[in-house]
Image: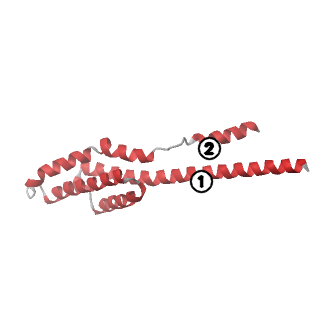
């Protein structure tokens, strides 16, 4: 009878351990999925910034749609700091693109605004990237699951 009780305790402990490991795995998967979604938004924003910085007229309707979709999705995946930055970046891109589309001759008064907006766009790597990075760092080392698995394998 004592053996049966001991076996029951061992089985219960193993079930609890397996449950914990499944929870840990699910949590890590959720972290990776969130990272993936955030990184895709970052990539779209970065590509748009590069495109506007190199040749503002190539910022066409398709690229604008991608950018606006990324900004819209970012609202639910990032904090107010990133969303405020993206809103200002969107405004700067509109200023630059409008200036380039209508032509400098028609928008002489807006040349200073265009220059300031382009300056902020060019500072993406100084200002924007650190804002995104704050949300994309892992709070726990990813190797935690592999460390636990290694300990189990070494005990065999």
**Furthest-right residue in view?**
1
* Figure colour scheme: secondary structure
Q: CA distance from mark 2 to mark 1?
A: 11 Å
Looking at the rendered image, the quarter that the C terminus falls into is top right
Tell me residue 81's x, y (percent).
34, 50
Lower sequence index among marks 2 and 1: 1
Q: Are marks 2 and 1 in contact (CB under 8 Å)?
A: no
Q: Nearer the viewer, residue 93 or 60?
A: 93
Tell me residue 18's x, y (percent).
70, 50
24 w.r.t. 155: above or below: below
Q: Is residue 145 left or right of residue 75?
A: right
Tell me residue 17's x, y (percent).
70, 48
Please give the residue where the numbered disc 2 appears in the rendered image. Answer: 145
Q: Secondary structure at mark 2?
A: helix
Q: Is residue 108 left or right of residue 15?
A: left
Please give the residue where the numbered disc 1 appears in the rendered image. Answer: 26
At a point 21% along the width and 48% down the height, the residue shown is 118
Tell me residue 25's x, y (percent).
61, 50
At a point 75% along the width and 48% down the height, the residue shown is 13
Q: Secondary structure at mark 1?
A: helix
Within 10 Å of disc 1 (Cα), the crowding (few <14, some 14-19, many 20+) is few
At a point 57% along the width and 52% down the height, the residue shown is 27
Q: Is residue 2 left or right of residue 61?
A: right
């Amino acid at each position: 009878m004592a053996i049966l009780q001991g076996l029951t305790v061992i089985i219960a402990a193993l079930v609890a351990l397996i449950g914990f490991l499944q929870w840990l795995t699910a949590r890590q998967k959720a972290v990776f999925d969130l990272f993936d979604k955030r990184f895709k938004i970052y990539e779209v924003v970065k590509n748009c910034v590069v495109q506007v910085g190199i040749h503002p007229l190539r910022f066409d309707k398709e690229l604008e749609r991608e950018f606006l979709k990324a900004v819209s999705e970012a609202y639910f995946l990032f904090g107010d700091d990133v969303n405020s930055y993206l809103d200002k970046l969107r405004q700067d891109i509109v200023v630059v693109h409008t200036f380039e589309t209508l032509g400098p001759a028609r928008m002489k008064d807006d040349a200073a605004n265009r220059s300031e907006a382009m300056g902020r766009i060019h500072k993406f790597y100084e200002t924007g990237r650190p804002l995104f990075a704050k949300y994309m760092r892992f709070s726990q080392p990813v190797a935690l699951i592999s460390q636990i698995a290694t300990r189990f394998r070494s005990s065999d």
